[in-house]
Amino acid sequence: GELLLARGFAKTDILVTTVEPERLADYLVAGDVAVSFIKACYSKLSSSPTKIAEYLACGLPIIANRGVGDLDSLIEGNGVGVLIDGFDTTSYKKVLTIDADALREKCKAVAAREFDLDVRARLGAARLLRRRTVVRLRRRRHDGRRPDVDRGDARRDRRRACDLDDPTLVA
């Protein structure tokens, strides 16, 4: 904390503490953004830091450096933060473009879609049902018979079977 104080931050802007795991989310949601700088090296190419999922679940956009596991595609592909190319003034200025308040809900949605096991299981079941319906429809068409299930009914059946309340979860 001393370095931040020396750079002009107030003591009330900084909190360095230890918290119990069950209280971590309470502290994270109080933040504006999450910073994850990890030295990009060979061993980190297949790394996926757990803290990234925790940050997103708490609605925190992420500021991270490139070259760590799948963070580049996760952050840029979903638009949930900013990746810096280096540890220099130009890269740090790029961070100022982040609009944390506008990204909070998007971060939570990405966390649910990418990391929540219940959601991922429902998505997997929906995809499997869709594939089975498509295969069944194709087989009937190949035999020259008309399919008895239209696309609208198939979608409703998938949602019902997977107990999906949010139709946007069906990919």
Image (spheres, rainbow, N blue to C red):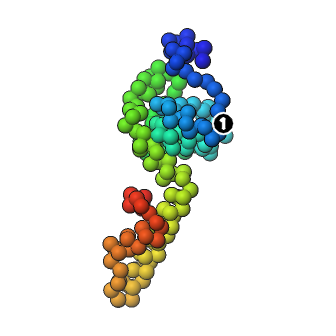
Q: Is mark 1 on a helix, strand or loop?
A: loop
Query: With 165 as the anchor, is 20 left or right in this view?
Result: right
Q: Which residue is drawn at 42% across and 61% down?
A: 165
The part of the image, by quadrant, that contains residue 168 is bottom left
Q: In which quarter of the image is the N terminus?
A: top right
Residue denoted by label 1 = 20
Of 115 and 94, nearer the camera is: 115
Q: Residue at x 48, y 37 (%)?
A: 60
Q: Which residue is drawn at 41% across and 33% down?
A: 100
The part of the image, by quadrant, that contains residue 51 is top right
Of 145 and 167, nearer the camera is: 167
Residue 136 to residue 44: above or below: below
Mark 1 crowd level (few <14, some 14–19, many ≥20, 10 Å Cα): few
Q: In which quarter of the image is the C terminus?
A: bottom left
Residue 59 to residue 126: above or below: above
Q: Which residue is drawn at 46% across and 66% down?
A: 163
Can residue 161 be seen here? yes
Q: Where is residue 114 in the image (x, y as percent from the top left)?
A: 51, 51
Q: Position of residue 32 (x, y in %)?
A: 46, 30
